[in-house]
Image (cartoon, rainbow, N blue to C red):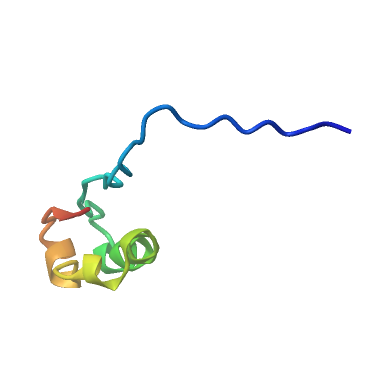
Amino acid sequence: MGKILYFPRRTSRAPARQMLHHIRLRVIDERDPAYTRWKTQYHVQNARGFPALKGFTDRNARRHRWHSFE
């Protein structure tokens, strides 16, 4: 059996704010940009939630516009 040793910290550290990544994406599919956007939408939604999908529409996908979120 082992014994767990606890060592106190010498300095107190403030909790670091979690840094978010800035993601930019663009749909460049010429054949079916709406379907590609729909597949990508699932991953964007899981990464950041529904607010990240604002402005990520079929119309902007057809125009090859950049979409960015944190």
Q: Residue at x 33, y 44 (%)?
A: 15
Q: Residue at x 34, y 36 (%)?
A: 13
Q: Residue at x 13, y 55 (%)?
A: 64
x, y (%) of residue 11? 37, 29
Q: Which residue, as the protein is rendered here, is positioned at the far top?
A: 10
Is residue 51 found left or right of 2 in the rendered image? left
x, y (%) of residue 36? 32, 61
For the N terminus, the image quarter is top right
x, y (%) of residue 12? 36, 35
Is residue 30 found left or right of 35 in the rendered image? left
Q: Which residue, as the protein is rendered here, is positioned at the far right?
A: 1
The quadrant in which residue 30 appears is bottom left
The quadrant in which residue 60 appears is bottom left
The answer to whether 31 is drawn above or below residue 19 in the figure is: below
Is residue 65 found left or right of 35 in the rendered image? left
All told, the count of numbered labels is 0
